[in-house]
Image (cartoon, rainbow, N blue to C red):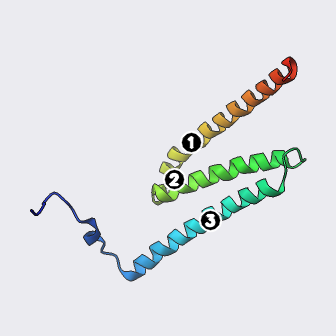
Amino acid sequence: MLRDDVIEYSLDGHHSEEAGKKIRAKIWKVTALLTAITLVEVLLGVYIKQGSGLWPFVKWTFIALTLLKAAYIVLIFMHLGDEKKSLKYIVLVPYFLFMLYLIFIALMEALAVGDAWATYGG
């Protein structure tokens, strides 16, 4: 029995080979950039040990690079990068503010827990 409710979307791909090359180049660019940022994070984590003088710098670098990767993923994979600048700001600014709020709460709670451990012995 032939179904008439199934739509074959692959037949709707009407782009040329040149457009396909642009799309594949963009995919490779996104992959390379995200891989490079992840590699920087991993290398920082491997070579700089906790307790060293650089560790606070490493932690803030992790946070910044993670936010950068998240924003880039939203811009590319959710097609926000194709929108007007004002819409990008409407979506990304509250996201960054919320992330900064969560980071602030996590750091304040970590300090409170550390103080409690120091006060009550742990």
Q: How far apart are marks 2 and 3 (CA)?
A: 14 Å
Labels 1 & 2 near each other (Cβ < 8 A): yes
Residue type at tag 3 = Leu
Residue furthest to the bottom: 17
Left or right placement of residue 108 versus residue 30 in this view: right
Q: Residue at the spot x=76%, y=60% of the render?
A: 43
Residue linked to disc 2 = 74
Residue furthest to the left: 1
Left or right placement of residue 33 versus residue 110 in this view: left
Residue type at tag 1 = Tyr
Residue linked to disc 3 = 33
Residue linked to disc 1 = 95
Residue 54 at x, y percent in the picture: 87, 49
* Residue toward you, 72 or 47: 47
Q: Distance between the residues labelled 3 and 1?
A: 21 Å
Labels 3 & 1 near each other (Cβ < 8 A): no
Q: What element carries label 1?
A: helix
Residue 115 at x, y percent in the picture: 83, 24
